[in-house]
Structures are given as C-alpha cells and as structure tokens.
Image: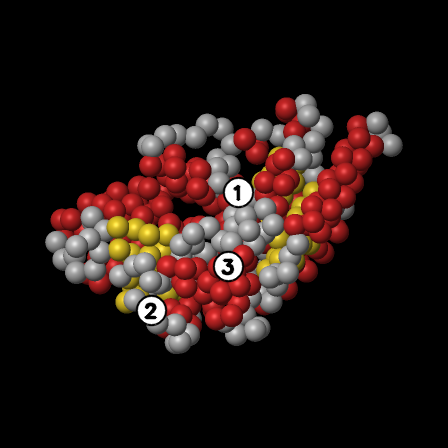
Amino acid sequence: MTARVGIPRALFYYTYFPMWQAFLEKLGVEVVFSRPTNKEILEAGIRETVNDACIPIKLFHGHVLDLKDRVDYLLIPRLVSPGGYITYCPKFLGLPDMIRFSGMKLPALISHRLSLRGLPGGLSRFLRATALSLGIKNPLAQQKAISHALKCHKLYHRLLLEGKQPLEASTLIQKKGRAGRNAALVTAAEAGTGMPRVALLGYPYTIYDSFVSADVYHKLQSMGVSVITPDQISPQELRRMSRVLPQNLFWYYSNRVWWAGLSLLQRKAVDGMIHLTAFACGPDAMVDKLLELEAKKARMPFLTLTIDEHTGEGGVQTRLEAFIDMLQAKIENNRNGV
Ligand code: SF4
C-alpha cells in the first residue's frame, strides 16, 4: 500500500511545500495536506496549545490535528538554519518536540534536522534522510527525486519573486508553466491608475494564510493597490541590506522582513507600509519597532496590524480603507504640489 505523508499547511509550508511534494510524489508516496485554515482548525489549535504560544504555533497544532488520522507519517522537520550565523526562530527548532509531547495521538513523525549551515548539500541530505525514514533505500531513485525536487524549489522561489502567491506558483510548476512579469512591480505610476503601492511585510505563514490574516493581501488587491511582499525582494538585494546594517537579528524570517522593509524604504519603492505582526511573537516585537522607527525617519506612512485569534474581518477592512484613503490623498497632494 502507498504510504501517505501529511504536511501541515502552516509555518514552513509556505517556504518548502512544492519541493517536498515534488520529492515525495516522485518516490511514489501520496502527499496529504491539511485543509486551508478555517475556524475549526484555529479553535482546535488553541485548545491544544499553551496560552502564551504565538498564533502561528497554535495554528500549526490545529493543522496537525486536521491531518493526523488521515496519514501514516507527518513531515515536521526541525528547521535549524538557512545558512551562516542565522537561525530560525527557536519555536521552529523545538517544533517536532513540541508536537511529539503535546499529548495528541500521532502517526510516525519524520523530523530530520534541516540546516544549510556548514557543509553544502543540506537540502539533499535532509531529503535523503526523509526517503530512508519511508523505507526507500534505492540511491538512484533517491537521487532522481532529489534533483526533481530541487528544480521545483528553485522555480517556486523564482515565481514568488515574480509576484505569484504560493498556491498559484505551485499550480504553475505542476503545469510546467512559466510566469510573466511581476504584476505587483508594474507600478501604479506605470499603470497610470494613481493607486498606491504598498509593502505588506510579515512572515509568509501570516501573509499567505488568508483566514488568520483576515485576507489582507486580497483585500488590498481588491482596492486596486499594488502589493509587494518580502518574497518579491531579490536574494541579492536582501544580502545587500544585511551588509549595510551594523547589527542584524538572529532569526531568518524576521531578518527577511526587516531587510525587505529597509530596502523598500531606501529605494522609496512604495507609498506606504503595512506590518502584519503575529500576537505573542517575541521577534516581531523588535521587528515592528525597528520598522516603525525607520519608516518615521523616512516619512513613510506605516501601519501595524496585529493578528490574533480574535482578529475580526470588519475591523481590518476599516483600518485598511482608512490607510489607503490617506495614501491616495497624499499621492494626490504631491501630484498637485500641495
Ligand atoms: S517568529 Fe514569531 S510568529 Fe514565528 S514561530 Fe517564532 S514566535 Fe511564532
């Protein structure tokens, strides 16, 4: 019988799922994702987690509950480092243990360490270890699946850079399609719409989860706003920003948000910034303050939206509308030399 491997649709899912899916399917394994976040998943996660956990960790528990009785294995890697001195937030490092000891009745966990620090080939080593956990020992089959998965990973991130959303990018990869120019970077000025360009800064697992984020991304788009996320800033530009600062943060996703924000401020590439921050996130407390101070120095309109389990659609919509109205008025005033 084909093994079924479950991948929770939360946290690192948004960075790695096309690669894992491509790898496992190439090995003949069935991949099962948890359902997109909904009220039931969120409430189940809240019940299962300690009170002071951040909302994305609560949500992760909810996604595990959604999957656990439908699969033979759960893929919950221990993400350590994307390279260099930077690490993932400590919650990622301890995630497999947090889930293992949560008291839930679970299928087998595949929780190998994923670290790109030190010797090259960290992704391949992780994938090979995953295949072995599934009892797949044929080195040729492993190698073919690894090559295919790494190609998909590269293409996925190129599509995100071009402005695609994760699911859209994954569908394009499966259709072997190619994206065109980044729609968000066709600026409002070029398009002549007079609508603002807005940076939506935050972690991929908050920005792209339409339920927990109150769908801020699409709300902005439906107002005619060009939305730019940290995924649309090139790795070269992020590296450049990492060198201009006297001190960086330690955590991968926090640094990406911080560097992306600074780069957009420096290049005056947007008309306003929204920081989507997760309630009870330690690193975000620092990132939000740093961004707010830099935006103030650059006289850039800045809005912080904190998401938690009580985030209401109506409240978010009202705040977004007020912010966009203010940006439009500012653009209009600048145009008229006021
Ligand atoms: S970075 Fe913040 S939101 Fe993300 S897992 Fe860590 S504490 Fe939670």
Residue drawn 48% across the image and 71% down it: 48
Identify the residue at the far right of this view. 338
Find numbered disc 2 in the image and state the secondary structure of the residue it sits on: loop
Task: Please identify the quadrant where the N terminus is shown.
Answer: bottom left
Q: Is residue 219 left or right of residue 22?
A: right
**Label 2, label 1: how far apart the Cα atoms are:** 38 Å
Checking the image for residue 106, the label placed there is: 2
Find numbered disc 1 in the image and state the secondary structure of the residue it sits on: loop
Task: Please identify the quadrant where the C terminus is shown.
Answer: top right
Quickly name the residue at label 1: 233
Q: Is residue 134 left or right of residue 101?
A: left
- Which comes before the other along the chain, label 2 or label 1? 2
Which amino acid is tagged 2? Leu
Q: Tag 3: Cα neighbours inside 10 Å, few (<14), some, or many (≥20)?
A: few
Q: Quadrant of residue 154?
A: top left
Query: Horizontal and vertical percent for residue 179?
Result: 43, 30
Quickly name the residue at label 3: 40
Q: Tag 2: Cα neighbours inside 10 Å, few (<14), some, or many (≥20)?
A: some
Q: Are marks 3 and 2 in contact (CB under 8 Å)?
A: no
In the foreground, 6 or 81: 6
Image height of 248 relative to 218, above or below: below
Which amino acid is tagged 3? Glu
Which amino acid is tagged 1? Ile
Q: Tag 1: Cα neighbours inside 10 Å, few (<14), some, or many (≥20)?
A: many
Nearer to us of marks 3 and 2 is: 3
Residue drawn 47% across the image and 68% down it: 91
Q: Quadrant of residue 115?
A: bottom left
Residue drawn 59% across the image and 43% down it: 217
Q: Disc 1, ligand 1: is the CB inside 8 Å?
A: no
- Which comes before the other along the chain, label 3 or label 1? 3
How is the structure coloured here?
secondary structure
